[in-house]
Amino acid sequence: MSLAAKPPVTEEEIDAFRAGVRGEVILPTDEGYDEARTVWNATIDRHPALVVRCAGTSDVISAVAFAKERDLPISVKGGGHNIAGRAVEDDALMIDLSPMRSVRVDPDARTARVEPGVVLSELDHETQAFGLATPVGYNSTTGVAGLTLGGGFGWLSRRYGMTVDNLVSADVVTAAGELVHASETENEDLFWGLRGGGGNFGIVTSFEFQLHEVGPTVLSGPIVHPFEDAASVLSEYREFAADAPEDAAVWFVIRHAPPLPFIPEEWHGRKVLILAAFYAGEMSEGEEVLRPLREIGDPIADAVGPHPYAGWQQAFDGLAPAGARNYWKSHNFVEFTDGMIETFVEYGERIPSEGTEIACAQLGGAINDVPVDATAYPHRDARFTMNLHTQWEDPGQDEACIAWARDMHEAMTPHATGGVYANFVPEAVGDQQAAYRENYDRLVEVKNAWDPENLFRLNHNVEPSR
Ligand SMILES: Cc1cc2nc3c(=O)[nH]c(=O)nc-3n(C[C@H](O)[C@H](O)[C@H](O)COP(=O)(O)OP(=O)(O)OC[C@H]3O[C@@H](n4cnc5c(N)ncnc54)[C@H](O)[C@@H]3O)c2cc1C
């Protein structure tokens, strides 16, 4: 038997490789192949030559060596949530890290060591046992690995910065097939690049994070308004957001109301504007801070109250299920202009499917206190990030949904910074300058030093210059 790779990989070579790894090697003819190649976004349907489900760092080193020997492109899978589906590629060797799922918390040092297959809910579960957390995203099945390497933000970021601002060190398998440690004092250039430069420089087999006291109960919840009131609610939201302390983060979403118990039944399926509010600090302080937000307009529902932090981190999972078709477009903003509000409303009127959301997260705060050149993640000016979560089921709707997202994105361009979060870019190639901005040239230097042959290119790629 031979595989689709060039030169062909023989059965004997596969057997020898399989014998040398602790995890599983899955071929197209094996049971489980389709499950192994499936990622979150259903528009991605690619067929790797083989999948290696790594049990540990040794397997990662073996897989890198095998791919180099056999001249197979390498794709790397953490949580498989990347919108462009970079974890899987036709005819490539897919290094699947999802079996590597341990989290070791040191409550005294307030750090956690995290393997690269861990998803956000697992990290939160382990750290919250000690009333600790680090900022990660709002959807709990997202992989810690890809999220961190692109930058990472969530409800705690206005208070404690991006996920990368809380990365203390990492273990990395390099293109040379060696395991190195990267931190502020060791392989500093690599450590800089890992904090926002994606999977360009090697395969991270362990992340060490700084943790903070959070919860375990936090003030949080959604406030639901009729879409008809969106313009006036958003202009009052803008006033609130301008003066909000770093402990407060309020995001908003325009979408069809999901059938959730706190939303009156007659509103299910109708268009709404949801303000999602979170306060990282003391509950009583949060009540005061969020009061003016809760007094805006005439809401249909207000479910702000004390909630377990780990539960709040999963509250929106049902709105972004694995296996739907998805296309995203994103912009960052410094100002929240009248023109933006008009555009939110205009395109909110024409949302193309039941699952689609116009989502906007409030950034700023501690994220913006970090100098642009301190980490590879460059968007330190952004105070808001819009992500058009265009989501649908029927492939026949592909064209209409993608066109809506592109049109709205274009309409928002005059208001935006021109930068885009690398983890929100839907195309496999493109937007490199927008994603890495003023840090691009330095990323090329790091790439030249650590991966001059561009072995790790199935990511938001930084091409080496020599
Ligand atoms: C529903 C949903 C909600 C989201 N919400 C947020 C949010 O709130 N905040 C936020 O910041 N982002 C958010 N994201 C974006 C998310 O950060 C990216 O999709 C990210 O790429 C997911 O990482 P992953 O490990 O799941 O993805 P994967 O597809 O497995 O990997 C993504 C990229 O990282 C590379 N990679 C993965 N693991 C490693 C590793 N160990 N070493 C080297 N390279 C590696 C892969 O090759 C690939 O290029 C969200 C995504 C989804 C789908």
Image (cartoon, helix red, strand yellow):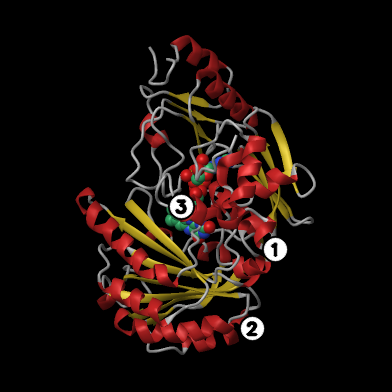
Task: Say which residue appears at 48% left-offset and 9% top-offset.
Answer: 12
| Residue 162 visible somewhere in the drawing | yes
> Residue type at mark 2?
Glu
> Residue type at mark 3?
Asp
Q: Place residue 318 in its image quadrant.
A: bottom left
Which comes sooner in the sequence, label 3 or label 1? 1
According to the image, label 1 marks what residue? 212
Which comes sooner in the sequence, label 1 or label 2? 1
Disc 1 from disc 2: Cα separation: 18 Å
Disc 3 from disc 2: Cα separation: 41 Å
According to the image, label 2 marks what residue? 285
The location of residue 344, given as percent across then percent down, is 35, 74
Task: Say which residue appears at 72% left-offset and 35% top-offset.
Answer: 180
Up-down relation of residue 259 to residue 449 (above or below)? below
| Secondary structure state at the residue bearing disc 2 | helix
| Secondary structure state at the residue bearing disc 1 | strand
- Marking on residue 59: none
Q: Place residue 46 in its image quadrant.
A: top left
> Residue type at mark 1?
His
Task: Check if mark 1's residue and mark 2's residue have beta carbons within 8 Å.
Answer: no
According to the image, label 3 marks what residue? 431
Up-down relation of residue 10 to residue 410 (above or below)? above
Task: Say which residue appears at 48% left-offset and 82% top-offset.
Answer: 238
Residue placed furthest toward the front:
466
The location of residue 15, given as percent across then percent down, is 50, 13
| Secondary structure state at the residue bearing disc 3 | loop
The location of residue 6, given as percent across then percent down, is 42, 18
| Residue 139 visible somewhere in the drawing | no
Mark 1 within 8 Å of ligand 1, using the beta carbon = no
